[in-house]
Image (cartoon, helix red, strand yellow):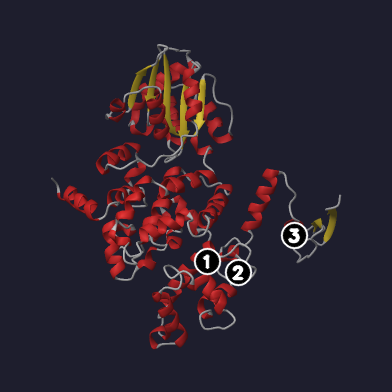
Amino acid sequence: MTNTATKSRTERGVFPSSAWVRFLRSYGPTPNNLTMFDEYVSDALNKAKVQPIRLSTPQLDAMVLHIESKTPGSLLIAGTAGDGKTYHCRALWTHIGGDAKVWADKSNVKEHRLADGRLAVFIKDLSEFNGDESDLPLSRFERSVCEGDNSEVVILAANHGQLLDRLRDLEKRQGRVHPLRKPLQECFLQAGLAPDRLTVFDLSRTTSRTTFDEVAKAVAEHAEWANCSLCALKGEGKVCPIDENRRRLLGESDGGQLASRLGDLLEIARFNGLHLPVRDLLALCSNMILGYSDAKVAKENLMTCADVPKIQESAGISKASIYANAFGANLPKRRVSGRPVFKAMTSFGVGEETTNAADGLLVYGKDDIKLRADFERLVASDPIYGATVEFLSAQDSYLEGYESTRVEGGAAEFVELLEAQRRRLYFTLPEDDPSYARWSMTAFRYAGDYLTIIQSIQTQAAISETIRGRIAKGLNRVLTGLLLENVDRIFIASSGGFTQSRVSVLCDHESSGKG
């Protein structure tokens, strides 16, 4: 028995959920994130002996219907890395009766004879073929789609760019125009129609806010967490940061407000054209629960159960704050920049952006009689990640002007803790609190209005006069270069001939909102 196996068995005896936590950790933003591959997940599950994270396969029913209806031609499961192409392939293989052992072997092409006599050919990942190794699978795909071969139905899983690159390479080497390249290019880039005899399932078009809700729920409500009830790390008034973060993600204390506000940020990122595959959402949830800012205590800034006793003894639980982990604040900058989901989250500037009211509360609230009630309600009410001993001590040092804080860079610790508190406030501020607006804690102060407009358009509801007036004022200032205050009409103006002028004072047209 290896040392690793012995260590795992020992951990499982002391910490009942250790195997599950290690498995969840493998989804996190580690430098060698092996869960990039569906095959690794299957192997890891067998070794850890835990239940898998079960997510829906939104396109599976349509794929099964395509097979069972005996529709001629083939299927293309397209998407970006991490969208679940292989996951859908495996689910379809299992549904039509494919052998799990055959799927688990090393070959990249799987075959299964259907009840109607056709041969289902699964090419589970085009990227695993090197160079001209993909010629044969692609020729079978072409015969099925373009040459009317009904003896086979090919199920091809491929990234958009890789498939188009392989087809271009075939064109160059074979000296011909491939009949599928241009139609597929238009299908991917312009949402055009798929070629005849080919059904395209583009998984990159299926993710939405509900996808994150499903992933967060699948992780935080996983059955393996039940073992935590037997763990000594939670007894005698102890706080286990892993269990605490999981409960906060579930929304046990805030009615789901944290997950909802995180969903707002991800939705805005999506509207801005950023596609976040399921793999990135799993990495986000894993980091939120297991993230820790001190790599000397938690390897690669992700906790295991074995790390928790050291964290409890050192009173360092605040370094596991789920509110900081949501923005990748526990990770080295290089690792943050390598993950689209954390790049998207940091782009909102939460922690760096603030208001005078919010900082006044955090810095002076404990001692200011006018702010004390708000401080008790919004900060002191959370002794785990809010008014911690570490934060209050740094706050006292800063306010008292101790020598250590007066030297250059001496207040850096308090500033860092202040950023962590701002991140927590974004998630915990009441929605209707007029003194502390949560969107003012971000770089996009009118993002809430933007989401309201989107919702109004989707539900065909009227947009509020306040928002319409703000848009009109903004357009007027852009179109004229003047600080106009008009909110009931839009002015189309020109400079009178000098087209490079930044100020347009001649009104060419006036559009009234009443028209």
Mark 3 Cα-neighbour bin, 10 Å: few <14, some 14–19, many ≥20: few
Disc 3 element: helix
Q: Does residue 195 lie above or below 399 as drawn?
A: above
CB-based contact (under 8 Å), mark 2 and mark 1: yes
Q: Which residue was labeled with disc 2?
A: 436
Disc 2 element: loop
CB-based contact (under 8 Å), mark 3 and mark 1: no
Alpha carbon separation for disc pair 2 and 1 = 9 Å
Q: Nearer the viewer, residue 479 or 346?
A: 346
Q: Which residue was labeled with disc 3?
A: 466
For the N terminus, the quadrant is top left
Identify which amino acid the numbered label 2 is placed on: Tyr
Identify which amino acid the numbered label 3 is placed on: Thr
Give the mark nearest the N terminus, 2 or 1. Answer: 1
Q: Which mark is residue 425?
A: 1
CB-based contact (under 8 Å), mark 2 and mark 3: no
Q: Would residue 179 be seen by someone viewing this image from the given angle?
A: no
